[in-house]
Image (tube, grey):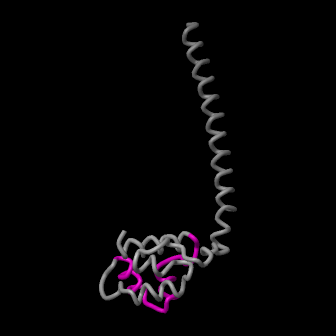
Amino acid sequence: MDKIERFQQAYDYLYSSGAYHSKTDLANKLGRTRENVSGAYHGRSPFFNDSFLRAFCEKFPEINQEWLIYGNGEMIGNEQAAEPTEEYQAIPKWADSLIQLVASQTQTIEELRRELATIKDEIQNLKNKR
């Protein structure tokens, strides 16, 4: 895995943990422009460089700088992994509601399918009696 891929993996990891919500949000946290972050994400010069990666690790110390820059060790350093933000922790609450809604709708659809099958059978029986 090259340096750009490692940065993208760290970026995705932190994004999914709720550490930031967009490239603009990350840029604000790093004191950089969105264009700078986007350029770095895609490995474009002069945005993607070790100075940018060090600033990234400084802001997010759970990312192992040795891994990010040199590929040594694991992505998550000695620091504790990023704690999900309050918004991220709320996802299971709305996800559970959504799952319950889908399950309820699925059950309703199955009941309607059984009724439809019964009606089709009754219609077929009536046709056969003619």
Q: In the image as oriented, which residue stretches furthest toward the bottom?
A: 31
What residue appears at the point 58 percent right and 18 percent down from the top-left corner? Answer: 123
Give left or right: position of 52 versus 84: left
Q: Is residue 48 magenta?
A: no
Q: Main secondary structure of the magenta part?
A: helix
Q: Nearer the viewer, residue 55 or 16?
A: 55
Residue 111 x/y as whole percent: 66, 34
Assign the C terminus to one quadrant of the image.
Answer: top right
**Picture quadrant of residue 83:** bottom right
What residue appears at the point 58 percent right and 73 percent down from the top-left corner? Answer: 18
What residue appears at the point 64 percent right and 58 percent down from the top-left corner? Answer: 95
Q: Is residue 28 magenta?
A: yes
**Picture quadrant of residue 8:** bottom left
Q: Which residues are magenta?
A: 17-42
Assign the N terminus to one quadrant of the image.
Answer: bottom left
Q: Nearer the viewer, residue 17 or 69?
A: 69
Residue 56 x/y as whole percent: 48, 84
Residue 58 x/y as whole percent: 52, 87
What residue appears at the point 67 percent right and 67 percent down from the top-left corner? Answer: 90
**Picture quadrant of residue 35:** bottom left
